[in-house]
Image (cartoon, rainbow, N blue to C red):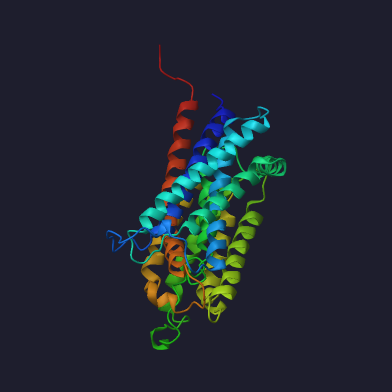
Amino acid sequence: MQRDLSATSIHHASWAGRGALAVYVVVLLYASLYPFIGWRIPESLTIFIWPKYSGSFDVGLNVVAYLPLGALLAARARRRLGSVRVSAAELVRIAVLCVALSFALSLVLELLQALLPTRVSSPLDLAANTLGAAVGAGAMLIAPGRALLAQVERWRRRHFAAEPETDWGILLLVLWLFAQMNPAIPFFEAGNFLNPLSPALRPDPYDPRILLPQATGIALNVSGFAMFVSLLLQPHTRAVLSVLMLLSLGLAAKLAMAALLLKAPQLIDWLGPATVIGLGAGLSLFGVLKNIAYRWRAFGATLCVFAGAVMAKLTSIYSALDEMLRLFDWPHGHLVNFASLTRWVHEAWPITTFLFLAVVFVHHGAHKIAAQPDRTLP
């Protein structure tokens, strides 16, 4: 029995697109309403009062924050039309709808911010958010944007598998890269940074009681991550090279953000002995397991992600959020929102990936059973 992956993958890609949109809306909700405490009836609604002072950084950040929302809405609407040639009037209608939805979301969030003592709602924020959504939607609907979207889809089909779960896995990969943008979270759980003002609390990284458990946890995490990536790729793709490129991209993002945000970038905290040993051992284990059958690779990835997450919790040294924030040197606002959001994504990633891999394992087992001929005697 041959599986019809073309129609199935398109159906799941549609759901994955909705999932990406839903995840981004949740990100905006979190960033707009954090820390979710102190709700009270406001004395006045500042959303109707133009602010006397407005920083260019905040305005620019609001524009950038809603760019992806407009782009995701426009891409979803455009994809639903398929290959049908769309008139200019239809494109304008789609753009207006995307901007209206973004405006409505921003308005609701600004009104909710008025109920929080630590947040300030402003018509300037509402205007900047709407402008960002308009730019994002317009970029997806003009001819160069549509051509870019088509090129991205061709690249996805060329390098990633046509399995129905692939697009959900790509979404998890994007979230993993987003979590790497927090430079105070070490690479693959080598323990969190501690305040440099308290060196007495910093353990000896060469102590075998610390080195071996941390290296084991990192090796399991790296191997699980590598097998997870290999499940998303086309069979002819060089999985080891792809994994190395993703690891390099994640580390580069962390280093770039460290140079931008931290008082004193501390490479040694990411590339200490446990990290180096764990990375090498994890990639070596992946080299042994990368050629096993797809379903059993999913099973191995599930075990490694679960075991690596448990080992990381047992061996990592976590500092409180306020302790972590002392490492940053950022004169602008929104630092707490960014650090908290990336930390939550980082914490949730192993759980969601474990569930994703478990679904892949069960799903492919069900298809294997369904593909077997009926051997019931007449």
Q: Nearer the viewer, residue 10 or 285?
A: 10
Q: Nearer the viewer, residue 120 or 64?
A: 120
Q: Is residue 1 above or below residue 342?
A: above
Viewer can see residue 267: yes
Location of residue 308 in the rendering, given as x and y in whole percent from the top left corner = 43, 61
Location of residue 13 in the rendering, given as x and y in whole percent from the top left corner = 54, 37
Q: Nearer the viewer, residue 41 or 80?
A: 41
Which residue occupies 47% across, 79% down?
Answer: 327
Q: Is residue 201 above or below residue 343?
A: below
Q: Quadrant of the C terminus?
A: top left
Looking at the image, residue 115 sits to the left or right of residue 266; the answer is: left
Query: In the picture, residue 258 is in which quadrant?
Result: bottom right
Q: Quadrant of the N terminus?
A: top right
Q: Is residue 117 above or below residue 269?
A: above
How many dots with numbers? Answer: 0
Looking at the image, residue 328 sits to the left or right of residue 134; the answer is: left
Location of residue 192 in the rendering, given as x and y in whole percent from the top left corner = 44, 73
Location of residue 180 in the rendering, given as x and y in whole percent from the top left corner = 53, 64
Query: In the picture, residue 345 is in which quadrant?
Result: bottom left
Viewer can see residue 319: no
Looking at the image, residue 50 sits to the left or right of residue 56; the answer is: left
